[in-house]
Amino acid sequence: MHAKQWYELLFENYARKYDSECFTQGTPGECDFIEKELGFDKSLKILDVGCGTGRHSIELTRRGYCVTGVDLSESQLARAREKASEQNLSIAFLRHDARELPFEAEFDAAIMLCEGGFPLMETDEMNFEILTNVTRALKSKGKFLFTTLNGLFPLFHNVEAFCAAARADGNASYRKNTFDLMTFRDHNITEIEDDHGNRKTLSCNERYYVPCEITWLLKSLGYARVDIFGAKLGAYSRDDALTTEDFEMLVIGQK
């Protein structure tokens, strides 16, 4: 049994608290954008990678789409199933590691929002495995929408200050952020209080990507077109050109 990674420990018994974090509040607007990108075609099958407590899966299912949610955290999935049943929605929420998905050409579209797995892995190779597995799960003309950390941001801004400014009472806090220019990884100490009131202190690191890296990775996986924009919480738009002010970027890959 391997020692649990920080991202596994983070999401244990953190489902209710997670739903109150500032960065999870944009679901309806984000789903508006997803619907528009999919041409409002409710016959499409959607894979939600790193679905967490199911916020996008549930909202899209409520709107008439067929969604399968996958996540590594059993406690996040339990909360997702609970929320779905409260709304009388039937959604398959499955426990899978995004580096080892069992799907092949099954989905018309995939979403991976709010750092759902990618870019949290320990190595660039593991992050790439996630992109590879999601791509394999898509049909030949599939579309892949995801958000990821914008590597241009930490070159111009202090990540710790940004996170502190966005934080609300009771939310996770981040300190001792150090951005490594050789690896584009931000190392930090994250402190959270879980759903049982236990405080956790975790040593985390996340990979920030620059746009040309993402384009190259997706092109190497066979995407015909890759578009990248700034990702504004709850208000994704193709009108938002990516800038150094954007903490996250929105990526749209079309096979």
Image: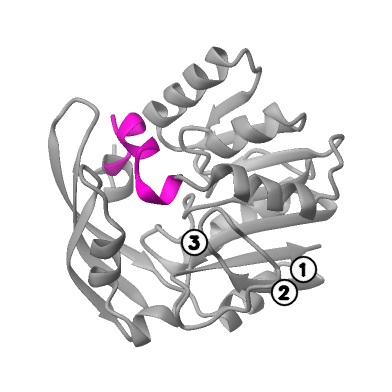
Residue 48 position by quadrant: top right
* Label 3 environment density (alpha carbons within 10 Å; few <14, some 14–19, many ≥20): some
Mark 2 = which residue? Answer: 219
> Which mark identifies residue 127?
3
> Which mark identifies residue 222?
1
Residue at the image position 53 percent from the left and 63 percent from the top = 232
Residue type, numbered disc 2: Lys
**Horizontal and vertical percent for residue 124?**
45, 68
Secondary structure that dominates the magenta span: helix
Residue type, numbered disc 1: Gly
- Find the distance from the CA under tag 3 to the CA under tag 1: 17 Å
Looking at the rendered structure, the secondary structure element under dot 1 is loop
Q: Give the range drawn in magenta.
A: 10-24
- Find the distance from the CA under tag 3 to the CA under tag 2: 15 Å
Residue at the image position 69 percent from the left and 47 percent from the top = 32
**Horizontal and vertical percent for residue 5?**
29, 48
